[in-house]
Amino acid sequence: MAQVDIRDAVKEKLPHFPKCSGVKALVNHACGYRLRVGHYRVLFDFEGTIKLVRIEEAGKRDERTY
């Protein structure tokens, strides 16, 4: 279940931010960071505390993307 996986990843990793794995800083994006959880992306900002912005499903990549 994706909801459980997302909840568990957020509870496990984000309290240890920025010293957690799986989080990447985003460039030229409305959100500052993303955490991958299966086919989903947890997008958030960090300004002393974590502000959860949104959760998006990642679509299938284009064949031209490697």
Image (cartoon, rainbow, N blue to C red):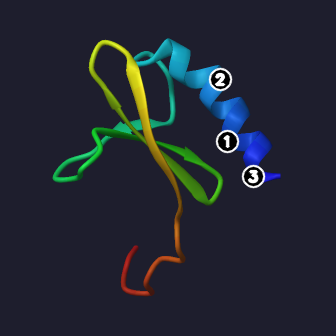
How many C-alpha atoms fall within 10 Å of the one at disc 1: few (<14), some, or many (≥20)?
some
Q: Is residue 30 left or right of residue 1?
A: left
How many marks the image carries: the answer is 3
Disc sitting over residue 39 in the figure: none
Q: Is residue 8 left or right of residue 55?
A: right
CA gap, disc 2 and disc 3: 14 Å
The location of residue 19, given as percent across then percent down, is 44, 15
Disc sitting over residue 11 in the figure: 2
The location of residue 47, given as percent across then percent down, is 27, 20
Residue type (three-letter) at the residue carrying disc 3: Ala
Residue type (three-letter) at the residue carrying disc 1: Ile
Identify the residue at horizontal 49%, vertical 21% (top origin): 20
Identify the residue at horizontal 52%, vertical 65% (top origin): 58
Res 46 quadrant in image = top left
Q: Mark 1–mark 3 contact, CB under 8 Å?
A: yes
Query: Is 32 in front, or is 19?
Result: 32
Query: Circle 3 — which element?
Result: helix
In which quadrant of the rendered image does the C terminus lie?
Answer: bottom left
Pick out the residue farthest to the left.
28
The location of residue 64, given as percent across then percent down, is 37, 85
Identify the residue at horizontal 30%, vertical 12% (top origin): 48
Residue type (three-letter) at the residue carrying disc 2: Lys
How many C-alpha atoms fall within 10 Å of the one at disc 3: few (<14), some, or many (≥20)?
few
- The residue to which callout 1 is attached is 6
- The residue to which callout 3 is attached is 2
Q: Is residue 41 above or below residue 35?
A: below
Query: Circle 1 — which element?
Result: helix
The location of residue 23, given as percent across then percent down, is 44, 35
